[in-house]
Image (tube, rainbow, N blue to C red):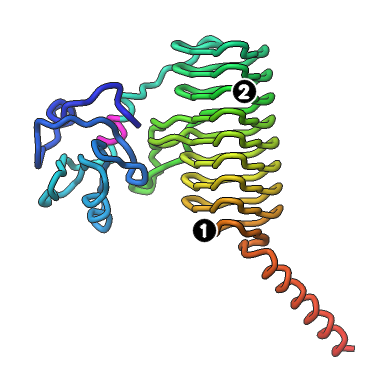
């Protein structure tokens, strides 16, 4: 998530009672979870086994709960509860802003776009030219929709990320500071749900077509010109390549990389990264020809077993 303008580290430290280790005159340009960090970003760490990953990440500013030596080019912000401070900063820049009307504030709708009855559009939304938004659609805050897109009835775009931190036996919700970005010529079928990112963007690539009742998790990136059939579920932070075909009821776990030109057959369960240019089937999913060979072998063994028992 980018800040609207750079934020002085001194001001952040003063507001949240943080002790600065490093450059106190610097300015942060954004805030992101560790999976999405870039130079200029703030992130946090509160578990010692993850210190190294955070301190050596692209983030410039790390909120941390133990005094350590800051690596070159890093500034540390010391406090007792880094997650609480991190979440509070996100809330500050993405405050709760309820929608009391069907059209929120600061909404841009492009030339010749059709918005049917009963559509609710949140704040700070951009909709491009020649789009068709059908009845009953919800479009959440900060969503960006390109040109020539179709969003069918009752689709829900830009809901909060399903993302929680477990602390003292409770689940604490992360504030969703990310967006949904839908590129040009995308079709999203009726009843689909697309979560916004926790801190980065959930992206639906140009030319991709989605059937009905599909769920896209927070921060997922769907490539260009993909076809996704009904009831597919794609978990958060997974990246799908270009020109992929995913058949109905397939489930894809979180934080995976699916290559380009991949086909996943119906009802497959994907729990590992998949190489480009191949076809996959089964649960756990593997190359289709291998799975079919396994099934044929099992069928043969079953027949032989039945025959010998007679």
Say above or below: 226 vs 156: below
> Number of labelled discs?
2
**Can you give x and y, in whole percent of width and height, for residue 289 in the image?**
70, 67
- Residue holding disc 1: 273
Q: Residue at x 65, y 19 (%)?
A: 132
**Which residue is at the front of the view, 16 or 274?**
274
**Which residue is at the front of the view, 244 or 3?**
244
Q: Residue at x 73, y 68 (%)?
A: 292
Q: Are marks 2 and 1 in contact (CB under 8 Å)?
A: no
Quadrant in the picture for residue 20: top left
Does the magenta segment cover residue 88?
yes
In the displayed structure image, the side of residue 65 where residue 31 appears, left or right: right
**Which residue is at the front of the view, 291 or 121?**
291
**Can you give x and y, in whole percent of width and height, for residue 288 in the image?**
68, 64
Q: Secondary structure at mark 2?
A: loop
Q: Residue at x 48, y 13 (%)?
A: 107
Q: Residue at x 62, y 25 (%)?
A: 149
Q: Disc 2 vs disc 1: which is toward the camera? A: 2
Say above or below: 276 vs 12: below
**Can you give x and y, in whole percent of width and height, for residue 30 in the image?**
28, 32
- Residue holding disc 2: 148
Does the magenta segment cover residue 187?
no
**Can you give x and y, in whole percent of width and height, for residue 220 in the image?**
50, 42
**Which residue is at the front of the view, 274 or 308?**
274
Q: CA distance from mark 2 to mark 1?
A: 32 Å
**Label 1 environment density (alpha carbons within 10 Å; few <14, some 14–19, many ≥20):** some
Q: Magenta region, mostly helix, strand or loop?
A: helix
Q: Residue furthest right?
A: 310
In the displayed structure image, the side of residue 257 where residue 151 appears, left or right: right
Question: What residue range appears in magenta?
Answer: 85-89
The quadrant of the rendering that contains the C terminus is: bottom right
**Disc number placed over residue 90 in the picture, else none:** none
């Amino acid at each position: 998530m980018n800040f609207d303008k750079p934020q002085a580290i001194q001001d952040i430290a003063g507001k949240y009672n943080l002790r600065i280790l490093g450059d106190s005159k610097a300015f942060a340009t954004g805030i992101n979870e560790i999976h999405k960090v870039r130079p200029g970003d703030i992130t946090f760490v509160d578990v010692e086994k993850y210190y190294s990953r955070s301190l050596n990440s692209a983030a410039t500013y790390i909120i941390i709960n133990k005094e350590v030596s800051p690596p070159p080019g890093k500034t540390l912000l010391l406090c007792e509860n880094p997650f609480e401070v991190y979440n509070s900063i996100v809330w500050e820049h993405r405050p709760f802003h309820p929608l009391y009307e069907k059209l929120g504030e600061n909404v841009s709708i492009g030339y010749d776009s059709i918005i049917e009855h009963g559509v609710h559009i949140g704040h700070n939304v951009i909709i491009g030219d020649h789009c068709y938004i059908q009845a009953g659609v919800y479009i959440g805050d900060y969503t960006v929709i390109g040109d020539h897109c179709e969003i069918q009835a009752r689709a829900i775009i830009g809901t909060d990320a399903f993302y929680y931190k477990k602390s003292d036996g409770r689940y604490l919700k992360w504030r969703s500071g990310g967006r949904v970005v839908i590129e040009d010529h995308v079709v999203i079928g009726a009843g689909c749900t697309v979560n916004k990112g926790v801190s980065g963007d959930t992206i639906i690539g140009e030319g991709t077509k989605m059937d009905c009742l599909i769920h896209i998790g927070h921060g997922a990136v769907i490539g260009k010109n993909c076809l996704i059939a009904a009831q597919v579920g794609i978990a958060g932070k997974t990246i799908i390549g270009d020109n992929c075909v995913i058949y109905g009821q397939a489930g894809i776990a979180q934080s995976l990389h699916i290559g380009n030109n991949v086909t996943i057959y119906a009802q497959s369960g994907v729990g590992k990264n998949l190489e480009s240019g191949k076809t996959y089937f089964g649960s756990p999913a593997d190359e289709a020809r291998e799975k079919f060979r396994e099934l044929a072998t099992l069928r043969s063994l079953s027949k032989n077993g039945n025959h010998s028992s007679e």
